[in-house]
Image (cartoon, rainbow, N blue to C red):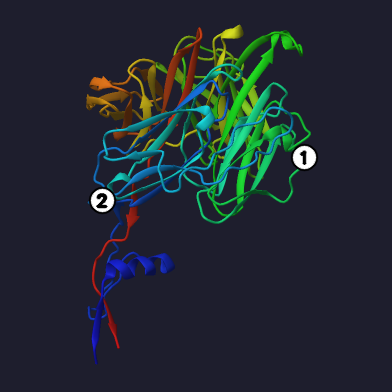
Amino acid sequence: MKRTTLSLLAAVTALAAVTGIAAITAPDTDDVPTQAKAPARLPVERVHLLCPAPGGTEAAETTYTSYTPLGSGSAVKGTAELKRSVAALTDRTAGPKKAPVSRPATEGKPLLALTEPGRPATVRTTAATAPALVGTATGRLAPGWTAQLTTVAKGDGRGLLGVNCSVPSAELFFPGASTAEERQDYVHLTNPDDIPAVVDVELYGKGGLLRTTVTEGIPVPAGSSVPVLLSTLTADVAEDVTVRVATRSGRVGAAVRVAETRPAAGKAGAAVAAEGSDWLNATADPSANAVLPGIPADATSVRLVAFAPGEDDADLKIQLAGPGGKIVPAGAESLHVKSGMTASIELRDVTRGEAGSLVLSPVQRGRATPVVAALRVVRGKGTKQEIAFIPATAPVGARASIADNRAKGTTLSLTAPGAAARVRVTASSGTEGGTPLVQTYEVPAGTTRSFAPPVPAGLKGSYALTVGVESGGPVHASRALALPLGGVAAFTIQTLSDDRGTVAVPRVTDELTVLD
């Protein structure tokens, strides 16, 4: 009889996936149960990111920034490359206004390649040549890899637009979109794979599911990006819409690009009174509690949009977590959200000169109904208005990073909705030089701390910020970037969430012996 020993590191993973057992007892041991050990957390070895085509006008410049934080990554050198999507597609629009689509490029040539962790890489291009990107990071560049698009757009749809490149997903929610006449909202669908994907895009207004012109799903060819104008999917006009993106087959990444133009006094053909544009990122997964961090202190209007995707209605308690603790906004104490419907409430100048974050929770503790939510935030008045969006976000967890921060105009917001927390903030070296800097901050329970983050010594170019919780309760975070644009205080806000740079792997506790 021959005894063949197999490596448990290879075998236990397959067995655990089938049986749920993380440790196995060798057959020659006594009949004493072996206590399963907690899975080890090891660095991920491959990450995929999808970046939408910037769109907008010809008078625009887009900056792509890629970054991987220093950490316990793989010994393998690896790569982190963002490449143009391979197909040029016709967008699904009606009328003269059309969003730009991705352009074909030299096969295999990356638009942006990151060479080392701890130092961001960047490249700039014009809107006319700015495509959707598909990216992959491997080896030591994979754990915590992030990428950011920042666009300065002038003319129609002017504004500062920022969006985090996202991972592919089977279901995404975007509360805060619109099919109103003054809005041009495009959902950008990007397929990273070499097989086609079919996607359902559902729109939910205050009365429920809107009638749609597409019943068989939207095809997204392999390696391609498709921009879809929401108002062409339905004849219904709705000011507040929740977009649900779900794949029938394949995988996609998605983001909603918003351009808004409001005529003076609401009269068609009148002079423009307000305009602005930005990206609406997907919210965190549906949850009974939600945190929307980083409302600017000088916000002139804040609108909360929420959606209940389940079978039950939700009654949400609304609180503002400011520098001094939580308060209940006068006249906006709660929001009732019917099942399968979108609800909204105007909070106006809820911050009253102090930056804060919105905290949503069930009115009744025993009635926890999952919801998704986002904020439409306005700064300025009249023709000087600009808009941005803050989706509900998950806690930063062990580590979260955001790229493309500037020496001036960057604000970091940290919110501890429950217990107090101690947070470590690392400023990376710059894209063109600078010395990294680490600082720690205390965030009292129930408060939001907004501040200019640390800047690397001798900074040249832009830099990345990495946030990690050292102790205490969960922390939610966002980064606001503000730049002057023709007399308008243009701004954009991106949330930070756990970068999932590690993955749980069953521990090796013994050898698996097979008799044959």
Q: Which residue is rendered at x = 30% and y = 57% of the image?
A: 38
Q: Secondary structure at mark 1?
A: loop
Q: Quick one: which residue is furthest to the front in this view?
A: 106
Q: Quadrant of residue 66?
A: top left
Query: How busy is the neighbourhood of tag 2: few (under 14 within 10 Å), some, or many (20 plus)?
Result: some
Residue 197 lies, in percent from the top left, at 59, 52
In which quadrant is the C terminus drawn? bottom left
In which quadrant is the N terminus drawn? bottom left
Q: Earlier in the sequence, mark 2 or mark 1?
A: 2
Residue 420 lies, in percent from the top left, at 34, 28
Q: Quadrant of residue 494?
A: top left
Residue 351 vs residue 34: left or right? right
> Relative to residue 387, is residue 362 depicted above or below?
below
Q: Which mark is residue 74?
A: 2
Residue 396 lies, in percent from the top left, at 38, 35
In the depicted view, which residue is nearer to us: 403 or 241?
Answer: 403
In the depicted view, which residue is nearer to us: 292 or 491?
Answer: 491
Label 2 sits on what residue type? Ser
**Residue picked out by circle 1:** 211
User: Does the image show residue 360?
Assistant: no
In the depicted view, which residue is nearer to us: 249 or 510?
Answer: 249
> Relative to residue 385, is residue 23 depicted above or below?
below
Label 1 sits on what residue type? Arg
Q: Which residue is rendered at x = 68% and y = 34% of the image?
A: 230
> Relative to residue 510, is residue 476 depicted above or below?
above
The reply to whether callout 2 and callout 1 are in contact (CB within 8 Å) is no
Residue 102 vs residue 76: left or right? right
Q: Secondary structure at mark 2?
A: loop
In the depicted view, which residue is nearer to us: 62 or 343?
Answer: 62
